Image: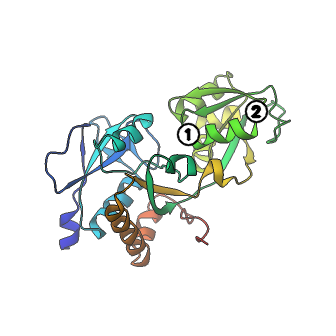
Amino acid sequence: MQRQLLAILTTAALVPLAQAEVTRVGFATEPYPPFATPDASGEVNGWEVDITRAVCAAAELECDIVTTSWDGLIPALTGDKIDFIAASLSITDKRRETISFSDKYYQTPAALAGAKGVELEVTPAGLAGRTLGVQSASIHQAYAQAHFPEATLREYQTQDDAHQDLFAGRLDATLADRLIIEQFLGSEEGQLCCEMRGSVSEDPETLGEGIGFGVRQGDGALRERLNEAIAEVRENGTYDEITARYFDFDIYGEPDT
């Protein structure tokens, strides 16, 4: 109970640290359901918020949520405006050039949704000449650039924007996290316009090694504290309890090797 009281997660604007004992956790302002979605008042809710709250409690950290645009998260971290990122940030070697990462806390595959009636295959040749929507600065954009060089890429600030253009017929397909694709295809609009075309092949270089908390390079003490807390919530059942509220499968992914 004492640990739970120590970890109070609230939503705040992107402001300098007011008290040294407060750990500022960066989330994106763009909605990413069911992981993190701001409501009308600006409060962020979702699976990733609940998991971060549990990790902060286990690490005995008092955490405040700080929101900024997706592409501003890493600059906010390196600029000391936040202390770590909890925004479905994939662990990649490219990002390791700028920041460091905790151990992963979930992992899901990437997949492609296509418009009904459009013939395409999830291959370089199958997507050649097709218009493919991707979220800007995402691992899926990096994957598409590396594996589908002859596709015409269209960048979007949010994946929801890409889905709307797919529904409107302005895209042939979109590449994103498989879970997010499945949610869209289960919606009224998704059922009308589109269908799953399959998962893409694994590529750790672009798709990463799972989702981890982003921390500043050199902040090894915080990274290790988060690693210990991730292990604790997985071992004591908290992780599974939270996950069961949102998903009916193991979102952690394959065990680390």
Residue at position x 35%, y 58% from top?
A: 52
Q: Outermost residue toward the bottom?
A: 236
Mark 1 highlights which residue?
138
Tell whether 194 sits left or right of 103: right
Q: In the image, which disc is placed on residue 149?
A: 2
Residue at position x 45%, y 50% from top?
A: 35
Residue 47 drawn at (x, y percent): 42, 55
Mark 2 → mark 1, Cα distance in angstroms: 16 Å
Q: Outermost residue toward the left?
A: 19
Q: In the image, which disc is placed on residue 4?
A: none
The correct choice, above or below, for 233 with respect to 22 in the image is below
The correct choice, above or below, for 9 with respect to 33 in the image is below
Please name whichever residue, 219 or 74, is drawn nearer the observer in this view of the structure: 219
Q: Nearer the N terminus, badge 2 or badge 1?
A: 1
Disc 1 residue type?
A: Ser
Residue at position x 29%, y 45% from top?
A: 82
Residue at position x 84%, y 36% from top?
A: 126
Disc 2 residue type?
A: Pro
Residue 101 drawn at (x, y percent): 45, 57
User: How busy is the neighbourhood of tag 1: few (under 14 within 10 Å), some, or many (20 plus)?
Assistant: many
Q: Do the numbered discs 2 and 1 sit on residues whose CB atoms are within 8 Å? A: no
Please name whichever residue, 140 or 249, is drawn nearer the observer in this view of the structure: 140
Disc 1 element: loop
Please name whichever residue, 189 or 78, is drawn nearer the observer in this view of the structure: 78
Tell whether 83 sits left or right of 46: left
Please name whichever residue, 13 or 251, is drawn nearer the observer in this view of the structure: 13
Residue 162 drawn at (x, y percent): 59, 30
The correct choice, above or below, for 236 with respect to 240 in the image is below
Tell whether 60 sits left or right of 147: left
